[in-house]
Image: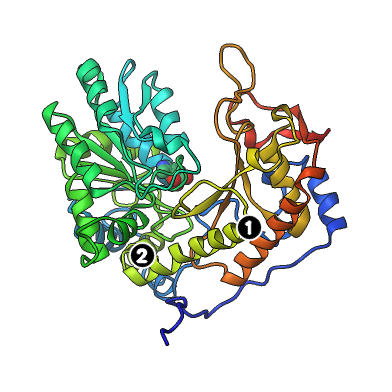
């Protein structure tokens, strides 16, 4: 008999979590104005609001923290981190930053100017923000198939080469670089194939352009290449990672994802001119070059985290857990964006709460119902997150209305996944009785989902 699958780690330290009663949750969510960002973490039983900075560090990472060199300049910990990044990516120049958006801020301050166009595959919201705040345009060239939630494709995060080619043919002189996000977070944690990275490289070369990889989940992307793309089954994750980065000129990194640290990020590049340019912005925005936004101890933990998370077994445990949750949802017939992504399941609320009018925010309503059901905190990626149209000030109901359930790395067991799945099933079973949603009582002009206050209709 074949042995069943089990985690590639065992547990050395635990953090108690507490269940609550429905009455408590009714009160807490009311006090939070029906916005889960305003709940306290103690009011949450299983927290799936994000996979960013919520992972569990290993014993080796905690041990490495003790070796942190907190020298202002020339810290040993910086050179240790740099050595690991050099070895994994082939990029010679490294600038640490306090998180991913800071890496974008520093690099884009050097590269992006008013009137520029930056093509890519569904730019992450902070990436888009750092482009648009410089009066430039983030041009989405993701394949059209990514928008169909029920279509099963192995690499649904890909760049559409025809769209990219067209962008370059029309606007080459305004394009400072191309950015490819691996995995494609906005499209649901969907991977980008090596073949696609090669196509992007070829197009970029024809126009003499450089390519940046927004690499928050580069290791998960490499896992999907190994398990789904022809010719990679026998390659190690580290070999695949090296090949991915060999097709790019630089990277921005949110280490809070695939670095498995709670805070951190960096820029890495093979080009001295990019390094020299970005350096000028690192010092005023982040700090001196050998720490950027990071403590020495955090650079040590990141160095170990990057090494560990580019090993197959660690990634296999992680991705299979997300797929386990997806399989449970399949069992109950609950619709989500297919196939399951690397870090999260995006539940299709508009297909579940069909009696809740879109003006009453079905995905937010589902988020609230799941919290009330079992104290599980997901996150609306839908009509509230979409903000209003800047010109008409109308709500934007054109996109998808999803409940995102992120799975933190190495934190929960499959028993927790079962609780999530069954709680969602219970809500799903009474979906037709849920006919009213929420209305907005107060909202900020931009990024309203963090602070919005809501009332039940
Ligand atoms: C999280 C993320 C960022 C921003 O990183 P932070 O560490 O949250 O600042 C950028 N790009 C992608 C794809 C991300 O997932």
What is the x, y in percent for residue 276? 20, 37
Question: Please, is residue 292 above or below residue 79 in the view?
Answer: above
What is the x, y in percent for residue 80? 26, 63
Which quadrant would residue 79 be assigned to in this image?
bottom left
338 and 157: which one is in front?
Answer: 338
Residue pictured at 54% horizontal, 62% vertical = 327
Q: Residue furthest bottom?
A: 1
134 and 341: which one is in front?
Answer: 341
In the image, taking residue 189 as reference, residue 231 lies left or right, namely left
Which quadrant would residue 317 be assigned to in this image?
bottom left
Residue pictured at 19% horizontal, 59% vertical = 231
Q: Callout 2 environment at 10 Å: few (<14), some (14 to 19), or many (20+)? A: many
Asked which secondary structure carries label 1, the reply is strand
Q: Quadrant of the N terminus?
A: bottom left
In the image, taking residue 272 as reference, residue 351 lies left or right, namely right
156 and 432: which one is in front?
Answer: 432
324 and 441: which one is in front?
Answer: 324
Q: Number of labelled discs?
A: 2
What is the x, y in percent for residue 223? 33, 60
Inter-mark Cα distance, 1 to 2? 22 Å
What is the x, y in percent for residue 9? 45, 77
Mark 2 or mark 1, which is nearer the start of the sequence? 1
Q: Which mark is residue 47?
A: 1
Q: Which residue is mark 2?
A: 309
Q: Which mark is residue 301?
A: none
């Amino acid at each position: 008999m074949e042995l069943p699958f089990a985690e590639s780690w065992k547990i050395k330290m635990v953090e108690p979590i507490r269940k609550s009663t429905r009455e408590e949750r009714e009160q807490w969510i009311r006090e939070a104005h029906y916005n889960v960002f305003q709940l306290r973490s103690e009011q949450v039983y299983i927290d799936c609001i994000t996979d960013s900075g919520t992972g569990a560090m290993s014993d080796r990472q905690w041990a490495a923290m003790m070796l942190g060199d907190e020298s202002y300049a020339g810290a040993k910990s910086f050179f240790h981190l740099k050595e690991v990044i050099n070895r994994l990516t082939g990029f010679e120049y490294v600038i640490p930053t306090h998180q991913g958006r800071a890496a974008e801020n520093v690099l884009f301050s050097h590269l992006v100017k008013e009137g520029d166009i930056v093509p890519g595959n569904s730019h992450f919201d902070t990436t888009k923000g750092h482009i648009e705040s410089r009066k430039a345009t983030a041009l989405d060239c993701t394949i059209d198939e990514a928008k169909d939630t029920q279509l099963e494709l192995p690499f649904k995060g890909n760049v559409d080469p025809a769209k990219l080619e067209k962008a370059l043919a029309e606007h080459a002189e305004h394009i400072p670089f191309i950015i490819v996000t691996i995995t494609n977070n906005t499209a649901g944690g969907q991977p980008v194939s090596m073949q696609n990275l090669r196509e992007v490289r070829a197009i970029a070369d024809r126009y003499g352009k450089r390519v940046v990889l927004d690499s928050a989940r580069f290791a998960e992307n490499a896992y999907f290449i190994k398990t789904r793309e022809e010719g990679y089954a026998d390659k190690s994750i580290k070999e695949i990672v090296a090949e991915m980065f060999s097709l790019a000129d630089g990277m921005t990194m949110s280490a809070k994802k695939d670095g498995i640290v709670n805070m951190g990020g960096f820029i890495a590049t093979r080009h001295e001119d990019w390094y020299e340019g970005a350096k000028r912005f690192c010092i005023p925005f982040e700090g001196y070059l050998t720490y950027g936004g990071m403590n020495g101890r955090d650079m040590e933990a990141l160095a170990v985290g990057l090494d560990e998370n580019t090993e197959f077994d660690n990634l296999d445990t992680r991705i299979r857990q997300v797929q386990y949750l997806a399989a449970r949802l399949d069992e109950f017939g609950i619709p989500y964006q297919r196939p399951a992504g690397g870090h999260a399941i995006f539940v299709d609320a508009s297909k579940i709460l069909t009696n809740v009018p879109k003006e009453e925010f079905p995905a937010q309503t589902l988020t609230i119902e799941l919290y009330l059901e079992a104290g599980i905190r997901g996150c609306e990626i839908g009509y509230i997150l979409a903000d209003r149209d800047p010109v008409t000030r109308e709500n934007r109901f054109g996109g998808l209305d999803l409940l995102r359930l992120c799975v933190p790395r190495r934190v929960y067991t499959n028993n927790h996944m079962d609780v999530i799945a069954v709680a969602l099933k219970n809500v799903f079973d009474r979906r037709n009785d849920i006919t009213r949603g929420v209305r907005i009582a107060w909202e900020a002009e931009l990024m309203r989902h963090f602070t919005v206050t809501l009332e039940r209709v």
